[in-house]
């Protein structure tokens, strides 16, 4: 799965988050910021990470989430790194 | 240690004596929820016409539920001691959902926080719950909750010795590493 495919899957997850305006999901790129661009509430970030785990069948460490940045690129990097570790 | 029963809240909570709003844990099932009590003192109601503030009720509930329960699970996950957990993390509010107040709590009135864990992942915990005050004189909460159960907690099944004070929804907190506050 390449980075673009991962982003596509992430967008599918974001569509299920009712606090995110679906119109903002049309042009999500690696530079999109969950908080600044999508107005994702901080409480939702953890839910999104949990949904990403399920979707990609991986398990993040608590510390990974502590250190996670707020851009789409950061979660893509984490998904790839976690998959490599497993 | 299987749960927080018998543990002093001051050993679990980072809060200092004047800000600690949990006196005793009465019932605790680590992945389900908790029951804890507190009795507001003179300092707690100072400059507030003898009543315990609603905002302090939310704080007391959060300390009793998300902070205590998540602290316990973190302690169990990594071993060590509560002191190590307290040295490593600071509990922070992430969000508060609806809170409906039905009654008041005055100085000297003991109340119990009943918290149900709805979500716990990546050191973020969400609890729903209720606060009840004890209205029957001389009721011993320790004795009352000695045969409490998950079923009773989930139904908020309490006797008429308790009066509903507040319903709390989606009280969300997270344990943040201390170094994040001082990068």
Image (cartoon, rainbow, N blue to C red):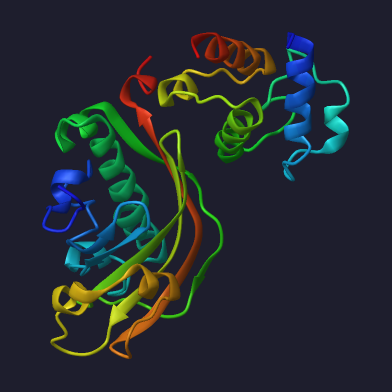
- Above or below, comparing residue B118 to residue B145 in the picture: above
Q: Is residue B145 left or right of residue A70?
A: left
- Above or below, comparing residue B166 to residue A36 in the picture: below
Residue drawn at (16%, 58%), measured in percent from left and top? B5
The image shows residue A15 at horizontal and vertical percentages of 79, 37
Q: Is residue A46 left or right of residue B105?
A: right
Using the rendered image of the protein, determine whether residue B158 is visible from the camera's viewpoint. yes
Residue drawn at (50%, 14%), measured in percent from left and top? A86
Give whichever of B154, A72 is nearer the camera.
B154
Using the rendered image of the protein, determine whether residue B46 is visible from the camera's viewpoint. no
Give whichever of B177, A76 is nearer the camera.
A76
The image shows residue B155 at horizontal and vertical percentages of 44, 76
Residue drawn at (59%, 38%), measured in percent from left and top? A47
Which image quadrant: the C terminus of chain B? top left
- Above or below, comparing residue A85 to residue A15 in the picture: above
The image shows residue B53 at horizontal and vertical percentages of 36, 66
Residue drawn at (39%, 72%), measured in percent from left and top? B151
- Above or below, comparing residue B99 to residue A83 in the picture: below
Q: Is residue B144 left or right of residue B64?
A: left
- What is the total number of numbered labels drawn onto the structure image? 0
């Amino acid at each position: 799965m390449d980075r673009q495919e991962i982003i596509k899957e992430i967008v599918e997850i974001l569509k299920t988050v009712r606090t995110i305006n679906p119109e903002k999901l049309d042009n999500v790129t690696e530079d999109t910021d969950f908080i600044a661009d999508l107005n994702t509430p901080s409480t939702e970030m953890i839910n999104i990470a949990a949904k990403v785990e399920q979707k990609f069948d991986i398990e993040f460490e608590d510390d990974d989430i502590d250190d996670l940045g707020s851009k789409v690129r950061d979660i893509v990097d984490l998904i790839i790194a976690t998959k490599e570790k497993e | 240690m299987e749960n927080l029963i018998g543990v002093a809240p001051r050993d679990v909570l980072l809060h200092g004596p004047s800000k600690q709003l949990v006196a005793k844990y009465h019932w605790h099932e680590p992945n389900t929820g908790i029951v804890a009590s507190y009795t507001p003192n003179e300092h707690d109601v100072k400059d507030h016409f003898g009543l315990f503030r609603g905002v302090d009720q939310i704080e007391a509930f959060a300390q009793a539920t998300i902070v205590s329960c998540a602290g316990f699970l973190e302690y169990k996950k990594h071993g060590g001691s509560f002191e190590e957990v307290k040295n490593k993390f600071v509990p922070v509010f992430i969000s508060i959902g609806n809170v409906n107040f039905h009654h008041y709590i005055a100085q000297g009135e003991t109340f119990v926080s009943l918290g149900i864990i709805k979500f716990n992942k990546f050191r973020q915990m969400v609890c729903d719950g209720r606060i009840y005050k004890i209205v029957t004189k001389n009721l011993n909460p320790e004795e009352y909750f000695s045969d409490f159960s998950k079923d009773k907690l989930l139904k908020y099944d309490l006797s008429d010795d308790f009066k509903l004070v507040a319903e709390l929804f989606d009280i969300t907190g997270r344990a943040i590493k201390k170094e994040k506050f001082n990068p």
